[in-house]
Amino acid sequence: MNILALYASPRPQGNSAQLLNALLAEAEHLGATSKRYTLNTLRLKGCQACYSCRQPGKEKQCAVKDDMQPILADLFAADAVVLASPVYMWQMTAQAKLFTDRLMPVLKPDYTSWLNGQRLLVLYTQGQPDLTRFASYFEYANSMFSFLGFRTLEPLVFGNLRDRNDIRQQPQHFERVRQAAAELVGKG
């Protein structure tokens, strides 16, 4: 199983990173391979709405030449995708949103998907202790990813994580991501 991991926090080793690292370590222990991108360190532009990706012979490609090209190639080759993002202003980070806005090349001109049903797991961390507070956004995001052709899994939401290392005070979260990794690899 090949996992594409996308880390969407500006904090290099924040709570989301620590949980994603634990998930990937467990998945690799179970035989998966993974490739990880830290979106905050990449040069990504917004979608230019040029529809070049809909032209014959240019399917699955983006005309904008930046760091999205290798991500798209790895996305099409992946069996599963894990997106880890803190919640900022009721939604995924700007880094994650920029990535999702650049997913137009996964859609055919008739708005069906070029994807092969890659599973998608989104891991959200939030300062808010109430895990249901942003549930409507998580449902919306999963609907968007389903429309794009992903087989979405129930998002993992971890709360009460404001400071960089708050996750270390909640070791049960690490067990939860290890279990998610086992389920992700087991369904491969």
Image (tube, rainbow, N blue to C red):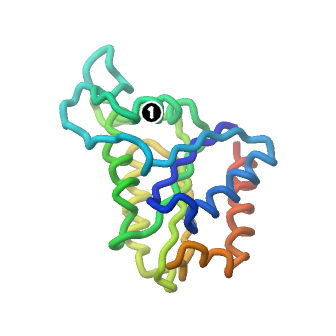
Q: Is residue 56 placed above or below 21 in the rendered structure?
A: above
Residue 144: % across, % down: 37, 53
Q: Is residue 49 placed above or below 8 in the rendered structure?
A: above
Residue 71: % across, % down: 47, 35
Image-based side of 21 in relation to 56, left or right = right
Quadrant for residue 92, please give it.
Answer: bottom left
Residue position for label 1: 72
**Mark 1 burial class by Cα count in 10 Å: few <14, some 14-19, many 20+:** some
Image-based side of 159 in relation to 1, left or right = left
Image-based side of 34 in relation to 88, left or right = right
Q: Label 1 sits on what residue type?
A: Leu
Going 48% across and 75% down the picture, which residue do you hit? 126
Quadrant for residue 16, please give it.
Answer: bottom right
Residue 134: % across, % down: 41, 75
Residue at the bottom extreme? 129
Query: SS of the residue at dot 1?
Result: helix
Q: Nearer the viewer, residue 27 or 136?
A: 27
